[in-house]
């Protein structure tokens, strides 16, 4: 077996999996009411952007060959309904208009479609008077957010709240409002993971003490349940599906790939990024080598697209 491993050129020739810059989607945070970009301590190298710095970042990504971004908003005011998620002048809607105006169709604009960044209680849905997440009332809000994002210029909306029926509700809402060309990337199998911690710093979300998302996100002991989630989302009209997080769920990615021929995404989440950054900062691992190894593993497991905070750095490497 070693003959074909002898030189770099031979290894390149026989590599089974090739990560490409075309596979990458960069998650970006845009925050209302700041005048310069704010570093996110637990996500080294990632910032909360101003509208201005967001434009420069997208220009830089495009110049490195990354042509897809997913936007997350950090509003100034949060309320029980997450109103800034569907306000035409909410921070993400403004960003979409500006990016579309500046970059036309040179970039694929995706939006996370959820309200946890916008609610004062931090849940992904609106609450009943008893404090439970109200599935069907939340679908109404998602619908309004989807239409606001589509109107502002999103190509793809990505519902991430794990409410039952969210894809069907959003599809029919978009179609009814004349947005039938807008695609849906379903966060189909999204686990109640401990790896979202740094992201919650990034969007300033804090659940009340003792609360969590396990009544809507998936139990990480289950894989068949993930396949059911994926089947439902596809039946409801998803154009693409996603598994999240990525590296801890390679078996889920693999199983979904065996069953599904639609484009399959995987989200290499904030905690996956920060673990690598922290170990590398201590000199314990080689950051780039481990990032490439993990992202390639995600592709090898069957993902077509990878959302990753490494997009900008890795793009340079893949190009060079
Ligand atoms: C929900 C959402 C979350 C992430 C993406 N969309 C947070 C959550 O479910 O708690 C996490 C992404 C990451 O950790 O990088 N709006």
Image (spheres, helix red, strand yellow):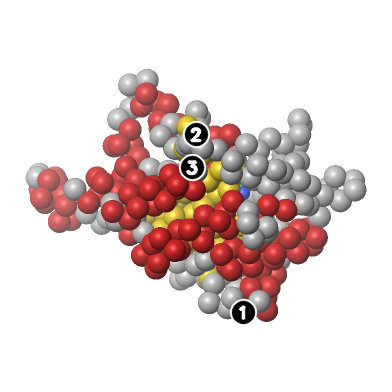
Observer-nearest of 297 and 315: 315
Q: Position of residue 147 (x, y in %)?
A: 64, 67
Q: Is mark 2 within 8 Å of ligand 1?
A: no
User: What distance separates the C-alpha of mark 3 from that of mark 1?
Assistant: 31 Å
The numbered mark at residue 49 is 3
Give the class, few, some or many, for how many residues have Cα within 10 Å of label 3's Cα (few <14, many ≥20).
many
Q: Which residue is mark 2?
A: 38
Observer-nearest of 70 and 54: 54
Q: Which residue is mark 1?
A: 178
User: What distance separates the C-alpha of mark 3 from that of mark 2?
Assistant: 7 Å
Residue with the most extreme top position = 282
At a point 28% along the width and 53% down the height, the residue shown is 63
Q: Is mark 3 within 8 Å of ligand 1?
A: no
Residue with the most extreme front position = 35
Task: Specify whether 178 is left or right of 26.
Answer: right
Identify the mark nearer the N-term, 3 or 1.
Answer: 3
């Amino acid at each position: 077996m070693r003959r074909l491993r002898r030189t770099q050129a031979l290894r390149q020739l026989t590599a089974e999996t090739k990560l490409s810059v075309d596979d990458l989607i960069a998650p970006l945070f845009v925050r209302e009411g700041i005048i310069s970009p704010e570093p996110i301590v637990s996500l080294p190298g990632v910032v909360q952007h101003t509208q201005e710095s967001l434009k420069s970042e997208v220009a830089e990504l495009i110049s490195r060959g990354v042509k897809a971004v997913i936007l997350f908003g950090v509003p100034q005011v949060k309320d029980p309904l997450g109103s800034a998620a569907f306000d035409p002048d909410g921070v993400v809607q403004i960003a979409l208009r500006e990016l579309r105006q500046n970059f036309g169709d040179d970039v694929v604009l995706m939006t996370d479609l959820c309200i946890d960044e916008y609610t004062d209680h931090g849940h992904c849905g609106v609450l009943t008077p008893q404090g439970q997440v109200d599935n069907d009332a939340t679908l109404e809000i998602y619908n309004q957010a989807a239409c606001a994002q589509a109107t502002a210029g999103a190509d793809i909306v990505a519902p991430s709240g794990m409410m039952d029926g969210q894809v069907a509700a959003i599809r029919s809402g978009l179609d009814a409002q004349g947005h039938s060309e807008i695609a849906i990337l379903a966060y189909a199998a999204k686990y109640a993971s401990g790896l979202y911690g740094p992201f919650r710093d990034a969007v300033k979300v804090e659940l009340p003490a003792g609360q969590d998302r396990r009544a809507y996100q998936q139990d990480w002991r289950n894989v068949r349940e993930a396949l059911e989630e994926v089947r439902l989302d596809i039946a409801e009209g998803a154009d693409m599906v996603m598994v999240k997080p990525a590296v801890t769920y390679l078996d889920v990615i693999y199983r979904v790939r065996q069953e599904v021929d639609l484009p399959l995404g995987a989200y290499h989440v904030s905690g996956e990024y920060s673990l690598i950054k922290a170990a590398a900062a201590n000199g314990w691992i080689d950051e780039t080598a481990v990032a490439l190894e993990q992202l390639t593993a995600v592709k090898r497991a069957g993902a077509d697209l990878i959302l990753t905070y490494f997009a900008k750095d890795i793009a340079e490497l893949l190009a060079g």
